[in-house]
Image: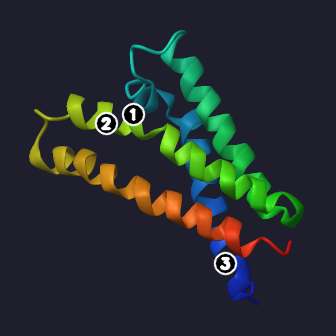
Amino acid sequence: MFPPASLRSPLALAGLLAGAGIAHFAVPRSFDALVPRSLPGSPRAWTQASGAVELTLAVGLVVPRTRRVSAHASALFFAAVFPANLKMAHDWRHRPTPLRLAAYGRLPLQLPLVWWARSVAAASNGS
């Protein structure tokens, strides 16, 4: 009925990435605002590109043959988007306390995401 424990972690990580990827296309304006102005091109292009990357990583995590590479790439992706979380925390510093806390709370979450992706990669060595 449920996947074995060895599959739950990569599938859960794939679900997280797929949900985030879909959100980038379903409600792009909220993500556009997080794109650092120093990046070339339009914020929407970066939003769509990051959403496409998240969806691609999710698919790669589901497929056993590509799971290890996709997990390593996911760890790199989580590290690469950290500047957007910093920008959000800076931009939201004057918002009401619950929103400000949400923005600040995202910052330390990147490290467990990187660790999670790396642990999926390590567990996929035999795949």
**In-image side of 100 versus 39 (left or right):** left
Q: Which structural element holds mark 1?
A: helix
Q: Which structural element holds mark 2?
A: helix
Tell me the quarter of the image containing the N terminus.
bottom right
Q: What crowding class fits label 1: few (fewer than 14 Cα within 10 Å), some (14-19), or many (20 or more)? A: some
Q: Residue at x 11, y 41 (%)?
A: 96
Q: Residue at x 74, y 44 (%)?
A: 56
Residue 47 seen anywhere in this rendered image of the structure: yes
Tell me the quarter of the image containing the C terminus.
bottom right
Mark 1 or 3: the one toward you: 1
Residue named by callout 1:
83
Inter-mark Cα distance, 1 to 2: 5 Å
- At label 2, which amino acid type do we have? Leu
Whether label 1 touches label 2, CB < 8 Å: yes
Whether label 1 touches label 3, CB < 8 Å: no
Please determine whether, in this image, residue 11 is positioned above or below residue 104. below
Inter-mark Cα distance, 1 to 3: 29 Å
Q: Residue at x 61, y 70 (%)?
A: 119
Residue named by callout 2:
86
View extreme (top): residue: 41
Place of residue 4 in the rendered image (x, y in percent of width and height, measured from the top left): 74, 87
**In-image side of 59 versus 77 (left or right):** right
**Closer to us: 27 or 93:** 93
Residue named by callout 3:
8
- At label 3, which amino acid type do we have? Arg
- At label 1, which amino acid type do we have? Pro
